[in-house]
Image (spheres, coloured by chain):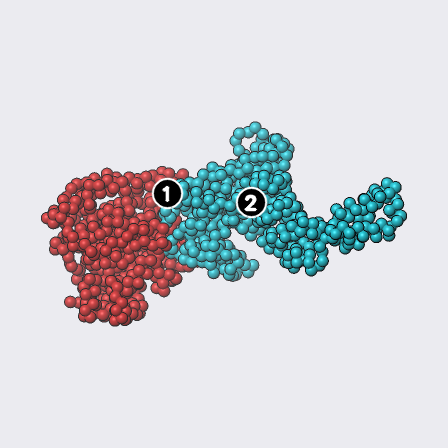
Amino acid sequence: MRKHYEVVIGLEVHVQLTTNTKIFCGCSTAFGSSPNSQTCPVCLGLPGALPVLNRQVVENAIKAGLATNCQIAPRSIFARKNYFYPDLPKGYQISQFELPICEHGHLDIETEGQGERGGHQTIGITRIHMEEDAGKLLHSDDPTTGSRVDLNRACTPLLEVVSEPDMRSSDEAIAYLKKLHQIVMYLGICDGNLEEGSFRCDANVSVRPWGQEELGTRAELKNINSFRFIKEGIEYEIDRQIELIEDGGEVVQETRLYDSNTGMTRSMRGKEEAHDYRYFPDPDLVPLIIDNDWIETVRGILPELPEPKKARFMADYSLSAHNTDILTAEKALADYFDACARQHKDAKACANWVMGDVQRRRNDEGISVAEIPVTPELLVGMLERIADKTISGKIAKTVFEEMWTSGKSADAIIDEKGLKQVTDTGAIEKMVDDVIAANPGQAQEFSEGKDKLLGFFVGQVMKASKGKANPGMVNELLCKKLRG
Amino acid sequence: MNLIDLTIHEMQQQLADGTTTAVALTEAFLKRIHATDEQLNAFITVCDEEALAAAREADAQRAAGNVLPLTGIPVALKDIFVTEGIRTTCASKIFGDFISPYDGTAVRKLKEQGAVIVGKLNMDEFAMGSSNENSAFGPVRNPWNSDCVPGGSSGGSAACVAARQAAASLGTDTGGSIRQPASHCGVVGLKPTYGRVSRYGVIAYASSLDQVGPLTRDVRDCAIMLGAVAGYDAADSTSVDTQVPDYLANLEQGVAGRKIGLPKEYFIDGLDDDVKQAVDDAVAKYRELGAEIVEVSLPHTKYAVACYYVVATAEASSNLARYDGVRYGERVDEGKGLIDMYSQTRAAGFGDEVKRRIMLGTYVLSSGYYDAYYLKAQRVRALIRQDFIDAFEQVDCILTPVASTAAFGLGEKTSDPLQMYLSDIFTLSANLAGICGLSLPCGLSDNKLPIGVQLLGKPFGEAELLQTAYAYEQASDWQGQLPTL
Ligand SMILES: [Zn+2]
């Protein structure tokens, strides 16, 4: 049935900003403090308290806007979104409505395949606006104690990034989300933690028969906390809606929740739907004026973004597109690699080690890039010894392990453990002679054309040298001697 | 002379030469409050102990040579200012026994200037009203005639100064709430330019209109009090970062050569004869003092009341949403769920006028009505503001009546909200335009009730406005007229 329908997806992402203080007061935004310990009259919504805009939040919003090709509004307005809920101390949320800070942006995404919605797509970004978060309700199992409210999160800054309904599959939705996630991480404005809700996604999903201009009725999937669940939720929703229409039913516009246990979405119908938020400009805040100087100052401190970084890695370090994608997926890793490649002439070797042993060990331990014990300087120190043939690639594996656990330099480890590669022709020649003498039968077979035995002899010599003999020289000498 | 009859500048003199002390002044005012407030009901909370402690501290500071303009001066606050450690009610039941954990900026500044706060004053609930009859703590009586209202919403603030229960008070003015009661009680009341005094710590009624100002016995006191509370405050994004002049420096400059405009739209039928006479006399006096009197036009005046009640109620409907019984105040919960708790709490906590304005404001912001009401009102507001900008191209100051009548009788207008709304017709344009305005006693009605004249000034033109008021005050017969209680 799917092939008769076109899927239309728009996404709303709430990005929690990592400013030190809240958006409208000076309280800390640190996570995990005891309930209501990070509050003041402003974020408690006490009588007489007034909001004061945190300029760092504006700067972060400008960064997000520039990085997503938005126009930055020279004048934008904060508005009140009015509704009652115990986690909303003022009875309204300060957000932006008619004049948001950023508009008319876009992100380019890549998906698998070619043509007919495979490959490259441009996804429009309708707007990005700033707003305050609400607090948290803590429900108790004991009905007599009632629910409690923790307002530590109240008034923490959020950006809401609203896309155009430009995505046509769950793959595109995920590619867009990952791209946006990558950008806010590169900008350093969000910790990117989906599970803790620092990067929250609502998906508007609808289907329509191919060729129909008008959009189908959409369902809004709320607050799904992993990329995988977002994909599953969207997939389920597509099937549900098509089935409904095929059975002669109609999709209702509603909010639905994805249940990761059942893999299904279910209606969250209720008072939520009946809201008239009565938005109006917040008279406690003046219009936000952003002049060109401010925009250019922020542009000047923007970090290198994923796309330019990829282009530079490919050009400067002659890396493949595939390897570049891996290395730039995460800004911290890209920086790690970049630091290595800037200090070592063989960028490919750097890339191989970073994508190989460094990532493998890091994944084993489940640590962040910042926690990698082998700094770029240490890794480069080792790569230099490989390049100048002090150690072989094989010995390097041992040195790397030792660096990881002890944090010592490659030179110190090579010294201590006597791992210096033997490059003395005389010494290697002696070992080669000994091995040949000890294995006359194999030597005979080799000379009769059994070339595969070369590996055996190399192995024997390397073993005799405890791995330290220069493998190239061993090879060369063996061939010369065995072939006579 | 009785201590309570002194003006602030006279008290400053006596405190300086050692004729009196802050404790003596404070005791005198507290005694006066306890003797008269049964009748007037101007106070919701009297803080004897805190006031006497502050007075002793003021005397100690003076002895140590630390003298500030308000050191030892007993003042009172409309109960719309939150005060650390002292109950704040906003004249509403919904606050319960709420005590603010912080002082607002104006209160902090008064304290820093050494003022002694004797108590919190009655008002219309949430500053919504023009007669002080909408209070959960009962109406305030006019000191000139206890069968009459003192005006509102800062009724307690005006009555307490006229009755000499405090040297001065602070009120708030959203549509005339300082100037109209000042007029009805025969005191000086100033609504500064929007942004001149911080709103931080003032319970919001209509945020884009609310402004803090003093009510005093005379113009010089008004200048002293304004100087104490005015100024930019980083905690209020709408306060304006412009220098506070010395309001006393050129107070006696006079009005010779100044142009005073009379807006023709304000001199209308329906003005009581005695009010018209008193205002005409004031105009004549200004002419005598050398001012040039010219007619000006504020063509959009007739839309001001409608515009005001859309803008003010829209903001109020949102500002009052926080009184939901969740975090503080009186909660009514019959265990029937959250929505029920909200409704019951707000139904029990708010008075009728507050509910009326919340409903009106909710309506004008509702989807489908927003453009027709809220947006249109904003456009009208811009036109009204432009009227004043144009008028101030021609004149330095605008003179109008404050109210069409002197104080009316208790209960006279309570059954007709619209009639009550119209009693602010001369004052609310200044709030919509954001300019400063002052009410000054200019006569007595046939019933021996005070009548005020309103002077409107350019944005941040308070110094000039005070000079203009002072010139009249010194030349007129009304200075120092006080009710006998
Ligand atoms: Zn706070």
Tag 1: residue type? Val
Instruction: Using the image, tell me which numbered label, if any, was put on residue A182.
Output: 2
**Which percent across, then down, holds residue A315?**
58, 39
Residue pictured at 27% horizontal, 58% vertical: B228
Q: Which chain is assigned red? A: B
* Distance Cα–Cα, label 2 vs label 1: 43 Å
Q: The C terminus of chain B lies in which quarter of the figure?
A: bottom left
The tint of chain A in the picture is cyan
Residue drawn where x is 61% and y is 31% of the image: A115
Given the image, on which type of amino acid does mark 2 rest?
A: Gln
- Between disc 2 and disc 1, the foreground one is 2
Q: Residue B364 got which mark?
A: 1
Q: Nearer the viewer, residue A317 or B255?
A: A317
Label 2 marks which chain's residue? A
Image side of residue B434 versus residue A353, left or right: left
Q: Is residue A118 visible?
A: yes
Q: Position of residue B438 (x, y in %)?
A: 22, 51
